[in-house]
Image (cartoon, coloured by chain):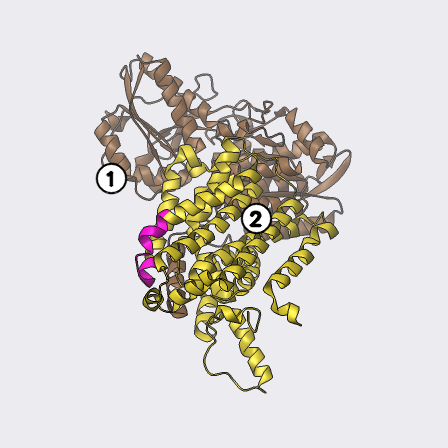
Chain colours: A yellow, B brown
């Protein structure tokens, strides 16, 4: 079973299997649409995990990157007639530039102060976008062309992007760059004393994550044919990215994927049920409390714990598992 | 950062999002009405085997919840009437109508996704539109992408009809027309010597396509008639605001004769309350299409007296069709209807007439039937509803002026049935 320990092979195998769905059921538009949106959320979760999980820099401002990417595509496609696919690299690039502008001052702050600053950044981006009505459409948003590719196309495009994001994540974790990020997460001063240029590395990983989020946002607005500042810069997007990782397991390789696979359908189900809409934040809040109190390692931590129990004849492991180090890739919870 | 710290910060953020009524947190559950509709529809479908599925996505929660519920009631009443009369005649066969209403929480992205869900999952034959302009704009890609016709009565920006839709039709006369009608009305009263010439105007508008239409019309009139109008303040504001005091302070400083504002119902109520608190006075005040709304009058009391509004329908219209509708509505819901209820009712009736005219449940055939329809017997001013080639309605405005004692006069256009001269300048501005 060595193949199962290679995340590259596992990810590509799953992607190939998932890619068959539109071939088998091309008219199942509901599932194809849900599949595409799930892939967008997976990309967001993986991207956030690179910064929040691997490098330990918990950001609540990723909506700024999503909104920037969304509006780069929306403006180039809707106002300048570009092919939306051609706008996607620029959507990522736009988000990277914003990430650099945000990262340079905020990464000078430590831990909680960095997180608080990013809350302000995300909300400021939304307010600016609302008021730049000549560019963003203001409170009306931008209505984009209706002639979009098929649902199958979006499904495949989302799947390819999610697979790419996952492979980037695996590569980073196995590279010296990833090891340096793990080092700065554990002890920034120690990492610096060993020669890790922490400020540069934090900005680089921030920009890589922003690129992935920006491209996913470009695809997202192409799918919707609509971009609105409140929605693409919404604070709930930033919170969602944190929640997906908390649910799946922050800092792990598969945790963001698992978290997105659970968070997105549950969110859709809750928001579609009139009796649950009003309590949707209560549901996610309760879930968050339960995870933090009883299984800080998220679902992957829980699975690892259950695996240990099974292996050790119902003997509980003392203490919760910690986010894994990169050398554990392909083994255990990873 | 430890997981407990991340959790605590995220939890705090969730509370903040909830408190702010963020996009992830519509303010309240939509209540039982949607379920009731579904139950009624389910009962209807048991009684008659042939069923047409119609879908609508409305803001039953969030900032536009009041208007969304009015629209749902209008759609329900029109649907009930058809079903109670034995069903809708389509090609000689009677169909019961099953209306599915979903709540978008006043969120554009969700609205668009739910409309798509109605098409792909619920397989609806046709769609009734949402409310307001921004949410209709969010929905407007879906009808053409799936070739499922939509008639909407909640979006009034002219921009809606410039995007090449073939499957979207509106029943609200667009806001650029409201703006130009308002300026014609003012010109008339300037000519009568009741308002100064040139009239200095402070215009404020929500920064949506709705507001831009209104502002554009005011600006155009000022440019075309510089001897009549002089705009001394031209300022936009954010939709669904909570504090308009800084904006109104600018209005006060502008010292204009007339105050024109294009605002939706929640913003109208908030802004005019603050207008009164600041002690502002103008010879003429209008909030576009807001003024005679019952919700506004209840909230503002005598403060809403003498406001002039251009609306798509009012219970003050003396024609028999309007009076019959008002009586029917009062019997059904025990309240006096406003234009929201009338327009949603007419929107559903036009859609059902279009399906009947098409004699088919095919989306393209229904679309073609709607494109050529001349719906008579409408309660809207003029009694007809038809559409231009872009789907824009060829309907009209009627202007009202609030009077003390919750009364309303029809004050424009002059030929309208029940016309009375407006009280001009407004008593509070003298």
Give residue A249's mark. none
Would residue B315 be counted in the magenta stretch? Answer: no
B312 vs A34, left or right, is left
Magenta segment: A101-114
Which residue in the structure is indicated by mark 1? B277
| Main secondary structure found in the magenta portion | helix
User: Which residue does the numbered mark 2 point to in the structure image?
Assistant: B102
The one of B383 and B177 positioned closer to us in this rendering: B177
The residue lying at 41 percent from left, 56 percent from top is B18
Q: Is residue B164 left or right of residue B44?
A: left
How many numbered markers are drawn? 2
A112 within the magenta span: yes
- Residue B169 in the figure: left or right of residue A110: right
Depth order, front residue of B1/B205: B1
| Camera sees residue B314 | yes
User: Is residue A195 placed above or below B405 in the rendered structure?
Assistant: below
Q: Which of pointers 1 and 2 lies earlier in the amino acid sequence?
A: 2
| Quadrant (top left, top right, bottom left, bottom right) of the C terminus of chain B | top left
Q: Read off the chain for label 2.
A: B
Label 1 chain ID: B
* Callout 1 and callout 2 share a chain: yes
- A98 in relation to B7, above or below: above
């Amino acid at each position: 079973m060595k193949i199962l320990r290679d995340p590259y092979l596992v990810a590509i195998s799953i992607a190939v299997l998932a890619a068959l769905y539109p071939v088998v059921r091309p008219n199942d538009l509901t599932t194809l649409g849900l599949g595409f949106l799930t892939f967008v959320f997976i990309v967001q979760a993986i991207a956030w995990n690179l910064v929040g999980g691997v490098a330990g820099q918990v950001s609540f401002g990723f909506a700024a990157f999503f909104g920037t990417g969304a509006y780069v595509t929306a403006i180039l496609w809707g106002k300048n007639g570009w092919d939306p696919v051609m706008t996607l690299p620029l959507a990522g690039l736009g988000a990277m530039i914003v990430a650099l502008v945000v990262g340079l001052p905020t990464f000078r702050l430590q831990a909680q102060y960095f997180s608080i600053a990013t809350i302000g950044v995300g909300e400021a981006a939304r307010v600016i976008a609302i008021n730049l009505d000549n560019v963003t459409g203001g409170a009306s948003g931008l209505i984009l062309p209706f002639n979009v590719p098929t649902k199958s196309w979006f499904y495949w495009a989302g799947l390819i992007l999610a697979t790419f994001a996952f492979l980037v994540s695996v590569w980073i974790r196995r590279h010296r760059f990833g090891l340096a990020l793990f080092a700065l997460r554990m002890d920034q001063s120690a990492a610096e004393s060993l020669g890790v240029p922490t400020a540069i590395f934090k900005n680089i990983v921030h920009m890589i994550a922003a690129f992935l989020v920006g491209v996913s946002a470009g695809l997202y607005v192409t799918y919707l044919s609509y971009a609105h500042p409140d929605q693409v810069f919404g604070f709930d997007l930033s919170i969602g990215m944190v929640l997906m990782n908390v649910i799946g397991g922050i800092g792990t390789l598969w945790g963001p994927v698992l978290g997105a696979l659970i968070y997105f359908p549950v969110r859709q189900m809750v928001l579609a049920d009139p009796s649950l809409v009003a309590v949707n934040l209560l549901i996610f809040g309760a879930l968050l409390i339960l995870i933090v109190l009883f299984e800080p390692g998220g679902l992957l931590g829980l699975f690892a714990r259950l695996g240990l129990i099974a292996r050790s004849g119902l003997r509980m492991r003392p203490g919760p598992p910690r986010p894994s180090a990169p050398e554990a890739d392909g083994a255990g919870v990873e | 950062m430890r997981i407990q710290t991340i959790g605590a910060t995220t939890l705090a953020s969730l509370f903040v999002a909830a408190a702010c009524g963020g996009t992830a947190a519509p303010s309240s559950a939509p209540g039982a009405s949607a379920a009731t509709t579904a139950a009624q529809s389910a009962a209807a479908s048991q009684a008659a085997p042939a069923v047409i599925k119609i879908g609508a996505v409305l803001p039953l929660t969030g900032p536009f919840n009041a208007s969304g519920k009015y629209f749902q009631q209008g759609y329900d009443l029109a649907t009930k009437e058809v079903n109670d009369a034995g069903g809708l005649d389509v090609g000689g066969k009677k169909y019961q109508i099953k209306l599915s209403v979903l709540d978008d929480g006043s969120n554009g992205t969700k609205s668009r996704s739910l409309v798509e869900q109605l098409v792909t999952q619920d397989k609806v034959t046709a769609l009734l539109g949402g409310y307001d302009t921004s949410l209709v704009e969010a929905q407007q890609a879906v009808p053409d992408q799936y070739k499922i016709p939509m008639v909407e009565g909640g979006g009034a920006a002219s921009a809606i009809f410039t995007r090449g839709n073939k499957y979207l039709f509106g029943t609200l006369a667009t806001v650029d027309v409201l703006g130009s009608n308002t300026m014609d009305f003012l010109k008339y009263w300037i000519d009568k010597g009741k308002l100064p010439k040139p009239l200095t105007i402070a215009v404020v508008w929500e920064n949506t396509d709705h507001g831009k239409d209104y502002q554009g019309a005011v600006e155009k009139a000022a440019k075309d008639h510089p001897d009549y109008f002089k705009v001394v303040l031209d300022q936009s504001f954010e939709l669904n605001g909570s504090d308009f005091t800084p904006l109104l302070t600018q209005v006060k400083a502008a010292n204009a004769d007339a105050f024109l504002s294009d605002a939706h119902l929640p913003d109208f109520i908030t802004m005019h309350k603050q207008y009164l608190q600041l002690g502002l006075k103008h010879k003429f005040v209008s909030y576009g299409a807001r003024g005679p709304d019952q919700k506004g009058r209840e909230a503002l009391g005598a403060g809403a007296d003498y406001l002039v509004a251009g609306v798509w329908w009012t219970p003050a219209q003396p024609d028999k069709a309007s009076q019959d509708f008002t009586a029917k509505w009062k019997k059904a819901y025990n309240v006096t209807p406003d234009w929201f209820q009338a327009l949603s009712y007419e929107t559903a009736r036009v859609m059902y007439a279009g399906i009947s005219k098409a004699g088919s449940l095919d989306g393209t055939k229904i679309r073609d039937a709607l494109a050529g329809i001349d719906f008579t017997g409408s309660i809207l001013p003029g009694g007809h509803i038809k559409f231009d080639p872009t789907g824009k309605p060829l309907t009209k405005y009627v202007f009202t002026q609030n009077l003390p004692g919750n009364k309303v006069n029809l004050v424009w256009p002059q030929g309208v049935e029940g016309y009375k001269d407006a009280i001009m300048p407004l008593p509070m501005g003298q």
